[in-house]
Amino acid sequence: MSRVDGKGIALLLDLDDCNGCFSCEAACRETHRYPYDEDWMRCERREPFLVEGVLRQYHLVAPVLDKCAACYEVNSNPLCVSGCPTRALKIGSLADMVKEAEGRHCSIFTA
């Protein structure tokens, strides 16, 4: 396993803001026109659950980050990010995404 050196990109997902609309998945497929038997970006809907007595529902984005890195090189504001209606998805350097996530309920994926 290689260590994260911070030189690659990172994709941040705000778990509180994502509503599971599949816009990121549709945007990725629209941008790259890959076949339907491939997944480059997938939105996984989760079942609602209780956290300290409060009903929470969150969804998880599952990107294929080597594809994201190649896309990010061409456009630093890809359609999956700019088309997110809740602005739950962000992309940039790992250091920037760590700062962005501070104090928030987020997942960070790195490539």
Image: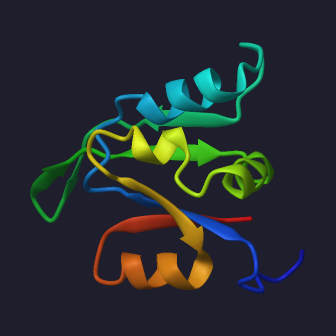
Q: Position of residue 103 (x, y in %)?
A: 28, 82
Q: Residue furthest front?
A: 74
Q: Position of residue 74 (x, y in %)?
A: 71, 50
Q: Position of residue 25 (x, y in %)?
A: 53, 30
Which residue does the image show at 50% across and 40% down from the upper left?
80
Q: Kindly indicate the quadrant of the structure image that contains residue 62.
A: top right
Q: Is 15 placed left or right of 22 in the picture?
A: left
3 and 92: which is toward the camera = 92
64 and 29: which is toward the camera = 29
Q: Quadrant of the C terminus?
A: bottom right
Q: Residue furthest top?
A: 36
Which residue does the image show at 59% across and 58% down from the upper left?
76
Q: Kindly indicate the quadrant of the structure image that contains residue 20.
A: top left
Answer above or below: position of 2 versus 64.
below
Q: Is 97 placed left or right of 54 in the picture?
A: right
Q: Position of residue 37 (x, y in %)?
A: 77, 15
